[in-house]
């Protein structure tokens, strides 16, 4: 079996992260000050498919293995830990697509390559009703 072909896609994702690192690092102070990802960094992350790493292949995601995901996040974190944290949040949320009905998953993730979700305990008050559901 040619295992070289199996590792090539993983190396590609890690290499993409390495290529993004200088741009992310250059914006790290701005990201810290504004408490959000800078527009050009966000655009570059979407362009490189960084928010689709754990999204199922059926939705045009990379569906990378956990070791590759950890390597990608590590490369991004070397440049800016906040950017890596945002990627982890969105990637964890994208895994939920595998547990949704296919039509709902396609509605959320399939139409827009820039679709990303994040949730967590960061809000002190939710700006929406506490009983929300995806229909």
Image (tube, rainbow, N blue to C red):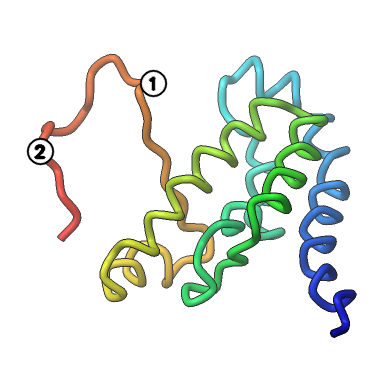
Quarter of the image containing the C terminus? bottom left
Marks 2 and 1, how far apart in space? Answer: 18 Å
Secondary structure under tag 1 reads: loop
* Nearer the observer, 88 or 66: 66
Is disc 2 in contact with disc 1, using a CB cutoff of under 8 Å? no
**Rendering quarter of residue 106:** bottom left
> Callout 1: few (<14), some (14-19), or many (20+) C-alpha neighbours within 10 Å?
few
Which label sits on residue 131? 2
Q: Position of residue 109 (x, y in %)?
A: 42, 64
Q: Residue at x 59, y 41 (%)?
A: 87
Instruction: Name the residue at 71% across, 59% down.
Output: 48
The image quadrant that residue 125 belongs to is: top left
Q: Would residue 11 appear left or right of 94 to someone viewing this image?
A: right
Mark 1 lies on residue: 122
Image height of 112 relative to 69, above or below: below
Q: Nearer the viewer, residue 86 or 31?
A: 86
Find residue 9 and report its horizontal and vertical position in percent. 78, 69
Residue at 74% over, 47% down: 72
SS of the residue under disc 2:
loop
What is the x, y in percent for residue 129? 11, 33
Locate residue 108 relative to residue 56 in the image: left or right: left
Q: Where is residue 10 drawn, in percent x and y?
A: 78, 62
**Chain-order first, disc 2 or disc 1:** 1
Disc 2 crowd rating (10 Å Cα; few below 14, some 14-19, many 20+) is few
Residue shown at 61% from the left, 57% from the top: 53
The quadrant where residue 76 appears = top right
Q: Quadrant of the N terminus?
A: bottom right
């Amino acid at each position: 079996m040619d295992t070289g072909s199996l590792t090539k896609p993983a190396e590609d994702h890690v290499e993409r992260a390495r290529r993004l690192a200088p741009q992310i690092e250059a914006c790290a102070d701005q990201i810290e000050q504004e408490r959000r990802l800078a527009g050009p960094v966000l655009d570059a992350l979407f362009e490189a498919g960084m928010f689709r790493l754990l999204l199922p292949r059926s939705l045009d995601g990379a569906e990378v293995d956990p070791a590759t995901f950890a390597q990608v996040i590590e490369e991004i974190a070397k440049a800016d830990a906040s950017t890596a944290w945002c990627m982890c949040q969105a990637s964890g949320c994208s895994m939920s697509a595998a547990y949704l009905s296919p039509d709902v998953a396609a509605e959320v993730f399939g139409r827009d390559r820039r679709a990303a979700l994040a949730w967590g305990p960061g809000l002190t008050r939710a700006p929406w009703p506490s009983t929300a559901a995806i229909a």
